[in-house]
Amino acid sequence: MNLYALIVAGGKGLRMGSEVPKQFLPVGGKPVLMRTLEAFHRCNKEIQLILVLPHSQQEYWKQLCGEYHFLLPHVVADGGETRFHSVKNGLAFVQTPALVGVHDGVRPFVSAEVIARCYSLAAEQKAVVPVTDVVETVRRVDKDGSTTVNRDDYKLVQTPQVFDAELLKRAYEQPYQTDFTDDASVVESLGVPVCLTAGNRENIKITTPFDLAIAEALLNSCSI
């Protein structure tokens, strides 16, 4: 069975306060996006990498690949108007039967263990999402104020979200809806259940200067 990873990188860097899109910012002397692609290649060299990137950023990516001598095999698909449309564009490069993971381009610290487990479970369960526990107190806010809720009833969702490719392609044939916040929500709209598995706390999404500082600290303190 073919294995694919769609690495979705459509950020503009607005929350980062940078003119350079966040996926291209350096962490430990190397662009975030390159570290993300390398994480999947290190885990399993059989995973075919598909980078989904806005067309306007693709020339800059080529320049970076030359500058950093980045030779990891991958194909580039055009990003779309929304994340939904970007994933749909990337799926056009996927040949079935296959398993396909969809991963945020600014999550470079996903562990090899999590990647491998998500693909392994998806071969049986068809739809797998890595999650972590909520460790802080959670309050639900409504028009009457706020109330503490049981944090054990909630999980924090990460990527890669891994699916049977035929299932994911079928899910993305649906019309776009604003409540499609991730790939699992698109698949669940077909009535297909999603299997949860443990993620890793280091698998942060780098979107702010604080996240970037945490990423540098992770590199300095761990062999990631």
Image: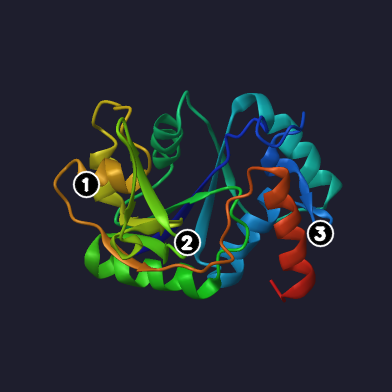
Res 45 label: none
Q: Earlier in the sequence, mark 2 or mark 3?
A: 3
Label 2: element kind: loop
Q: Earlier in the sequence, mark 2 or mark 1?
A: 2
Label 1: element kind: helix
> To which quarter of the image does residue 71 belong?
bottom right
Relative horizontal placement of residue 36, taking residue 137 as reference (left or right): right
- Residue at point 47%, 70% (across, down): 114
Relative horizontal placement of residue 40, taking residue 139 as reference (left or right): right
Residue 74: horizontal and vertical position, in percent?
Answer: 60, 50
Residue 120: horizontal and vertical position, in percent?
Answer: 35, 72
Front position in the image: 147 or 33: 147
Residue 210: horizontal and vertical position, in percent?
Answer: 71, 49
Residue 146: horizontal and vertical position, in percent?
Answer: 35, 42
Q: Earlier in the sequence, mark 1 or mark 3?
A: 3
> To which quarter of the image does residue 62 belong?
top right
Label 3: element kind: loop
Q: CA distance from mark 2 to mark 3?
A: 29 Å
The residue under label 2 is: 136
Q: CA distance from mark 1 to mark 3?
A: 38 Å
Mark in the foreground, 2 or 1: 2
Q: Quadrant of the N terminus?
A: bottom left
The residue under label 1 is: 188
Relative horizontal placement of residue 33, taking residue 135 as reference (left or right): right
Do the CB atoms of the residues marked 2 and 1 lie less than 8 Å apart? no
Tell me which colouring the rendered structure shows: rainbow
